[in-house]
Image (tube, helix red, strand yellow):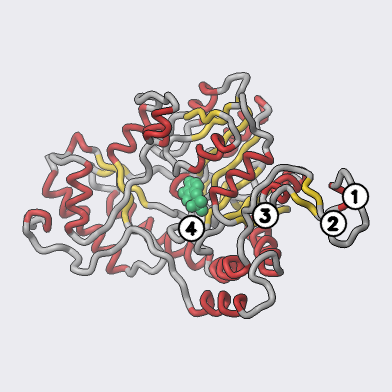
Amino acid sequence: MEKLAILGGTPVRTKPISYGRQYIDNADIQAVVDTLRSDYLTVGPKTKELEEKLCKITGAKYCVAVSNGTAALHIAAIAAGIGPGDEVITTPITFAASANCVLYVGAKPVFADINPETYNIDPASIRACITDKTKAIVAVDFTGQATELDEIRSICKEHNLVLIEDAAHSIGTKYNGVPVGNIADMTTFSFHPVKTVTAGEGGAVTTNDEELYKKLVLAHTHGITRDIAQMKNPTDDPWYNEQVGFGYNYRITEFQAALLMSQLDKLDMFSKRRKEIVKTYDEAFADVPQIQVQKEIPESDTTRHLYILRLHLEMLNCTRREFFDALRAEGISSQVHYLPVYWHSYYEGLGYPKGLCPEAEKYYQESMSLPLFYSMTDEDVADVIFAVKKIIVYYAK
Ligand SMILES: *Cc1c(COP(=O)(O)O)cnc(C)c1O
């Protein structure tokens, strides 16, 4: 048996590999530089072009590009008309922003449990959480895999709820052949550097509903409009614009938009490589009894953002922390996605008790994310697999 690096053995990698990394090429750099030399740094043609491009990719009718994915969730919550007294159901296995957007508008996040095999929100648990205060669902495509959208949409129809799909992980994913972004009432995206395509910081909301679109536009730019049709006190003064609603400044810059457009040109390429890596991992771990491979629902053609290594700890003589540290010592960086949102001390302070979602809590204690990014070489992937198996063999009961 090979000696683990953490116990003084030779590490699999001398040059550590990170768990995620953006891929920026010369075309991306040129796009940003060209925009910096143009007339507009914000509110210009690139943002419009980006919105059109995202509509084309997703098939959605309307798109509002914004400064980040959290802003996208916030304006979606505003456009949905969520407010004090309302409840919004979401998953605890997500980045905090999926629930924070509910707090931003004064409403209460309610956490449904996850499916222990797909790690996405469990529709049966959603049903159990519905009350007469439920206004919306924020469904997250965790790791990039589409949630059970058919089932969740029918729950929304039955109870007259707004469906916001947090697709921060899932650009490029299709559900029953339809791209995410063209399925829920509103779909939000994030273009943070760890995500599949990046704008540095950036986000977007897509929708097919014109009324929602108008509200999204207002909310992302101070509630101010130049559209006479929307004004209460229209004048023909050429300088006149009117604040007709409540909003924020969540605009994206022109150079972020240009970077993202250039990145989107590579989406198919990114997607293909991510799928290859996931397939290689899945095949390598399929016959390792100590590892649970994430289940894919047949409806989802997934562009994976994260690869989850879930351990059957009852079959190992180590803790998740020991595994994580051993992996790091081998030169493989990992991360945990995510602490159940309501375990954060802030949420604890709001009164959410431990034990609320047992499947989510169990998942959290057994999981970590392996490196997954476009520019990983086959050798990198092989090193990760070798390191994981080396540690499994050492700690196997
Ligand atoms: C990254 C992320 C967000 C927030 O996006 P930002 O662009 O970082 O604000 C929201 N939800 C999920 C699931 C995310 O992973």
> Which x, y percent locates residue 169?
49, 51
C-alpha span from label 1 to label 3: 25 Å
Image coordinates of residue 79 in percent, x first then y, are: 69, 41
Seen at 13% across and 45% down, the residue is 395
Dividing the picture into quadrants, the one containing residue 346 is top left
Q: Amino acid at mark 4?
A: His
Q: Amino acid at mark 3?
A: Val
Residue to which mark 3 is pinned? 64
The mark that comes first in sequence, 4 or 1, is: 4
Q: Is the C-beta separation of discs 2 and 1 under 8 Å?
A: yes
Numbered circle sitting on residue 240: 2
- Mark 2 element type: loop
217 left or right of 128 in image: right
Contact? badges 3 and 2 (CB < 8 Å): no
Horizontal arrangement in the rendering, residue 226 relative to residue 131 (left or right)? right
Camera-near label (3 vs 2) is: 2
The residue beneath circle 4 is 192
Separation of marks 3 and 2 at Cα, in angstroms: 23 Å
Q: Residues within 10 Å of mark 4 (few under 14, many from 20)?
A: some
Q: Which residue is mark 1?
A: 234
* Residue 271 image offset from top left, x and y in percent: 48, 62
Helix, strand or loop for disc 1? loop
For ligand 1, tell me if the residue under mark 4 lies within 8 Å: yes
What amino acid is at disc 2?
A: Tyr
Distance (Cα) linking label 2 and label 4: 35 Å
**In this picture, residue 88 sits left or right of residue 336:** right
Q: Residues within 10 Å of mark 1 (few under 14, many from 20)?
A: some
Image quadrant containing the C terminus: top left
Q: Residue at x 7, y 60 (%)?
A: 9
